[in-house]
Amino acid sequence: MKTMAYLDHNATAPVKPAVAEAVRTAFGACGNPSSVHGVGRAARRIVEDGRDAVAALAGVRPERVVFTAGGTEANNLALRGAGRSRILAGATEHPSVLKGADGVETIPVLRDGRLDLDALDAALTKNDEPALVSVMLANNETGVIHPVAEAAQIAKRHGALVHCDASQAPGRIAFDMPSLGADLLTLSAHKLGGPMGAGALVLGPGVEIESVLRGGGQERRRRAGTENVPAIAGFGVAAALAQDDLRDAPRLARLRDLLETRLAAEGAVAFSADAPRLPNTSCLSMPGVASDTQVMSFDLAGFAVSSGAACSSGKVEPSHVLAAMGVPDADARRAIRMSLGWSTMDAEVESFIGAWIALRRRLGASVSAAAA
């Protein structure tokens, strides 16, 4: 298999070497972390070390971290376990939030992709039913950073709880749960160079949830099921390394800006370019060329990119994120996402720029000839 330039970190970041080593070591711990014998206690120590590291990343005490099988489960647990009869979520949230419970009400976003705070206030004002408001910290498709702290202030005035899916933030922007004002926070290991199969729902002070999975007393009876010890070991190492990744954010922002500037001269449209964004994410539309054609062409050329979210990139429908922003359907169907990260080399971005320009000129010429 040829070497690929991997530009899809928002889907899954490559596992870091130290993480892989921690996972390999943890596979040697055969005990169940709920067992009281020595082997079980050794497995429990691995879990609790991982919990300490994830708690430090979120800025909370370790006992507030509930391990799950990933971000999707954490989002479902937040929405279903918080005990609120009314759930409001931003229109560009991840599908595991928008479809994570029945009857989720969507709050519109502005043209640049940020949550419409006035619309949130109005929605909470018209109904005093106990509510949960879910606002992601950063969007997985456009990289837009939402005003979570401001949304939390509005929600708290109305007595609502606040859930924040922060899966895309660690290692890319500095944050902590107390500053966001969130009552519940979702994290996902494989978005920050950890293994798949591990996530966490972090609880704010005084906040409790009802377990959705039943049949065991694990995770302080908040989530039944034996903990995934190797994945949690890797999650902990990745969480500890995420702070170091922040030092690389200026380089990634420079590469993202270079990418967008060079391709704008060839007709590319960068969505949410004027909004606060993650330093690693660019969502671009190539005039006249469908998203799936671009993804397949770049794959053959040795570049891994995606069309929208990884969980929905196989669909024919355009991105719900871009649709919520008012992007015309034709433009949305031509959009792809590039997301950089710790493994991205400057030369890979330069090479991708050349490949994008070549594809645009080749297929653009074909489209023009066909139209003539």
Image: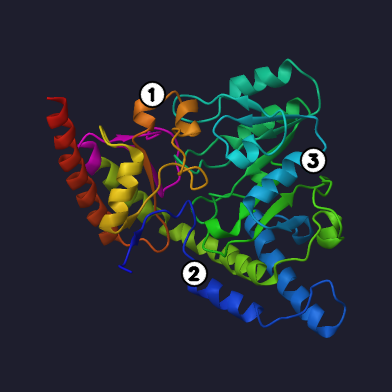
State the residue in front, 201 or 76: 76
Residue 20 as seen in the image, left or right of residue 25: left
* Nearer-N-terminus badge (3/2): 2
Residue pointed to by mark 2: 16
Asked if residue 139 lies in the magenta stretch, the reply is no
Of circles 1 and 3, which is in front? 1
Task: Find numbered disc 3 in the image and state the secondary structure of the residue it sits on.
Answer: loop
Q: CA distance from mark 3 to mark 2?
A: 34 Å
Residue 239 as seen in the image, left or right of residue 293: right
Position of the C terminus, as image quadrant, is top left
**Type of amino acid at the residue the image marks with label 2:** Lys
Q: CA distance from mark 2 to mark 1?
A: 38 Å
Residue pointed to by mark 1: 328
Answer with the quarter of the image where residue 274 lies.
top left
**Type of amino acid at the residue the image marks with label 3:** Ala
Residue pointed to by mark 3: 82
At 53% across and 56% down in the image, what residue appears? Answer: 191
Instruction: Give the x, y percent position of residue 249.
Output: 42, 54
Answer with the quarter of the image where residue 112 lies.
top left
Instruction: Give the x, y percent position of residue 64.
Output: 77, 55
Answer with the quarter of the image where residue 59 lies.
bottom right
Q: Is residue 362 above or below residue 328?
A: below
Task: Find numbered disc 1 in the image and state the secondary structure of the residue it sits on.
Answer: loop
**Type of amino acid at the residue the image marks with label 1:** Pro
Q: Which residues are magenta?
A: 262-285
